[in-house]
Amino acid sequence: MLHPDYLLRQQRLQSYMQEAGIDALVLSSNVALLYVYGQVFAGLAVLLQQGEAHYFVRRPQTQPETSQLHHIRKIEQLPEWLDLKPLRRVALEQDEQSYSDVQRMARIFEGAEIVNATPLLRRARMVKTPLELEQLCQCAAQHVAVYREVPKAYREGMTDRDLQIELERVMRQHGSVGLFRCFGSAMEIFMGSLLAGDNAGTASPYDFALGGAGTTALPLGANGTPLTEGTAVMVDMAGNYGVYYSDLTRTYSVGQLPAEAYRLHELSRQLHREVMQTAGPGSSCAELYTHSLERVTAAGAADYFMGTELQAQFVGHGIGLQINEPPVLTPRSRDVLEPGMVIAFEPKFVLPGVGAVGIENSYLVTETGVENLTPAPEEIIDLRTGLAHA
């Protein structure tokens, strides 16, 4: 039987469908199927305004028992199981499917108005259900455990890529699935980002908080920078220890950094206390960004905030089945925080000649405030000694 939590998610979607006048919601992406069914399968799910979703599976596999599970060879068989004639408005995942797949699906629902389901799905997933929060918290705990191992993975003479390879090995040993799901066809990343020295200021074509040159095939993150004396090393590796994601960034050093690096790092920590940890239900996402920028500007650090060559115009984002979910803490956002949202807050600074400093935590919005799900040490840790500099 399906876990009751999945039925709760379907009911949430149905309430949005009714609000938008959508008769049927067709789900085909891996993320959407995980959300309503708990498994990835070859096929699709169809959710009507009433009742449990129907699951149409093309390749048999082990699945939870449900009377709504149907085995098909091709999607054109849907009318054998569902009466499609009364459907006047059908939502497809147009931001996730190819043009040809959308056209093929539209022919099955001939006569119905086809609309985009993706905004509705992303809206529904902003507020997590109890099972989602349980899985996300389990992931966050593993994420914190892995970061305790970062100094142990360091050896003299390494490059940033060498250290990232060792951390990826540690991650896999702790249960990482080795996959980093992002929203957007032009968003790619492997198992996270590790930025050392001036590479932290290198612009990337991807819409992450910071870039890095990476490689020609994947222009993001580590690029072979030697980890030499006075280099800041920012570790932003994936929290992918299950179905849901957590987000966590910590800064390390090779020896002593300049005083300005520690000042900016402490400013990031202060922003967490002054902005995110004083937020709660009803807080405006736009105001959280504006407050952060005002605080940074007053400290004379705006030129280094969220990059140098290209400065990101956000300071936080939702997380869940994908690492970049709404709401986004940006000056244009109309969203407000609600209980059950999980937000990654990441005020970061890039200091030329040194590298990136700052921290990122994942926060659960509760009925009364926020809870830090990633309580790892926040000081800059020297990779050579494993100790924080005074």
Image (spheres, helix red, strand yellow):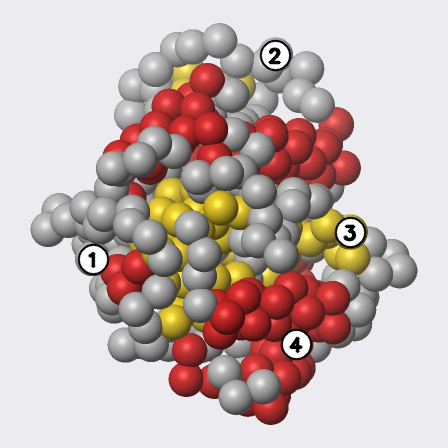
Report the Cα–Cα distance between label 1 and label 2: 47 Å
Q: Earlier in the sequence, mark 3 or mark 4?
A: 4
* Residue beneath disc 2: 65
| Left or right placement of residue 21 versus residue 166 in this view | right
Quadrant holding the N terminus = top right
* Residue beneath disc 1: 213
Circle 2: residue type: Glu
Label 3 sits on a secondary structure element that is strand
Circle 3: residue type: Glu
Please give the label number shown on residue 371: 3
Q: Nearer the viewer, mark 2 or mark 3?
A: 3
Circle 4: residue type: Leu
Q: Nearer the viewer, mark 3 or mark 1?
A: 1
How packed mark 4 is, by other alpha carbons closer than 10 Å (few <14, some 14-19, many 20 or more), is many
Asked whether residue 30 appears in the rendered view, the answer is yes
Quadrant holding the C terminus = bottom right
Please give the label number shown on residue 325: none
| 200 and 112: which is toward the camera | 200
